[in-house]
Amino acid sequence: MLLSNLSIESDFSYLISNHSWSFKEIKRSETNYITHGYHRYPAKFIPQIVNKLILNYTSTGDTVFDPFGGCGTTLVEAKTLGRKSIGFDINPVAKLITETKITPLNPNLLEKYFIKFSINLENSIKHDSTLIHSERINYWFEPPVIRELDNIYLTINEIKNYRVRRFYLCAFSHILKNCSRWLMKSIKPQIDPNKIHPNVESTFRRHINQMMSKNKEFYELLKSKGNLNTSAKMKLSDSTKRFPLQDNSVDLIVTSPPYVTSYEYADLHQLILLWLGDDPQRYPRWYKYTQEYQAFREKFIGTKVADNKDSKFLSFIAHKIVSQLPNNRKYAKSVARYFSDMQKALSEMYRVLKHGKKICVIIGNTTLAGTYIRNAEVAAEQMENQGFILKDVIKREVSNKMITPWRDKVNGRFTNLKSSQKMRVYEHEYILIAEKPKNLSN
């Protein structure tokens, strides 16, 4: 359904769900096929959406770009389809996960390393050195669990092959939540006082075996299509700043920006950040992140700790939303900062996209302090005011299986179906499809 440029708000109110984009029949196992299930990640969009967009708007050999790369869904799907890809994210954990997911490893090589790893792990009691852990690691983990995890971690760091070592570190990162005091059903940092910890070694071995199986699927799929060497690159970059890309250099942008104030990505991924940060000799950059943790958190788009430093949104709808938020809280400032950061990112997306090519933004709305935050409408208005021509807006239903659908009416925190104060959120999201005008001078 095409939108009128005269009234985005009115046109959005008449949108109906497009069932062909809801993928309701898709099972969780299908969304986690090949390498997509390597590591948990909040609110990741399903690969079927990305696959369909790439097929619709690109040809083999084109370059696909995702400025909010997250866990690399766009890059993985681009590689399977023979498209070059580039992703940015400010989160080093996202970079670790994505680089692991987009790197097919020879299955025979992994089998050999697994045998050697198993032997070394059995002898891990010989490790003389143990890490000196921070108070936060000791807060999240029981002492016996820390010792077991240290054995695995130190054995991983004996692996000489960098790509294989990264593969094992990704698996290690994934199991940290399982082995910690963290409440498994919560994406927020929350202690579960009744949690029964699993066996650490068997948990790790089980996940490594699953990843090895998925890697084999990925490797064989790429090999059969001749895409093993298709370029896919993930860079650590702040997408509110100038992109390290040339003007008019990418053929398609597919991205899903963070939801405003919904997920504290730095907090959510703090366990692996803290663990590697406790090892400054091997991981000095991660150590720096942990030492400057508050400043690190404030760089994330959508964080609640951010303050507004720029009120230029290029959006009438955004100003109206911010004016409805309570001034006695940080909400108004943090939402204003979010819209401002999104405007900067969209400006850079416009610069790097080729003329006549498409940008696809998957984004949903949320509620904060009793105010409906219409992220999709704001993004549509910002895109048009930036110079993009809005071609289509697809409204799709979001499956309960893919994202936590309930929030508490009072405090806005995630809750469950049993809560008397529950309210449904994330029932729908929108795919905004726009085009950078053709260069008439050529």
Image (cartoon, grey):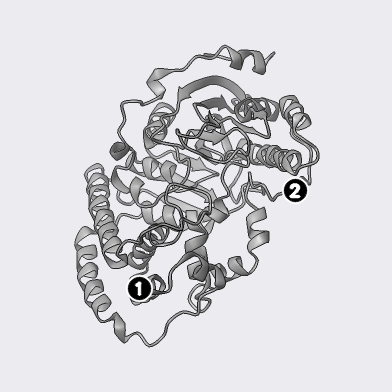
Q: Nearer the viewer, residue 375 or 404?
A: 404
The answer to which of 442 and 196 lies nearer the viewer is 196
Residue labelled with disc 1 = 148
Determine the residue positioned at 63% across, 44% down: 302
Q: Provide residue 243's location: percent of width, then percent of height.
A: 62, 48
Disc 2 versus disc 1: nearer the observer? 1
Q: Is residue 256 above or below residue 140?
A: above
Dot 1 alpha-carbon crowd within 10 angstroms: few under 14, some 14 to 19, many 20 or more: some
The answer to whether residue 236 is seen in the rendering is no
Residue 17 appears in view? yes
**Local secondary structure at mark 2:** loop
- N-term mark: 2 or 1: 1
The amino acid on which the numbered mark 1 sits, given as a three-letter code, is: Glu
> Label 2 belongs to which residue?
307
Query: Disc 2 to disc 1, how far (Cα)?
Result: 40 Å
- Spot occupied by residue 370 in the image (x, y as percentages of width and height): 67, 30
- How crowded pointer 2 is (Cα within 10 Å; few <14, some 14-19, many 20+) is rated as some
Asked if 19 appears above or below 223 in the picture, the reply is above
Count of all numbered marks drawn on residues in the image: 2
User: Disc 2 marks which amino acid?
Assistant: Asp
Q: At 50% from the left edge and 46% from the top edge, which residue is drawn?
A: 69
Question: Can you say which quadrant of the picture contains the C terminus?
Answer: top right
In the image, residue 270 lies at what x, y percent? 52, 60
- Give the image location of residue 257, x and y in percent: 56, 39
Q: Nearer the viewer, residue 345 or 276?
A: 276
Which residue corresponds to the image point at 26% horizontal and 78% vertical from the top-left?
120
Give the quadrant of residue 288. Answer: bottom right
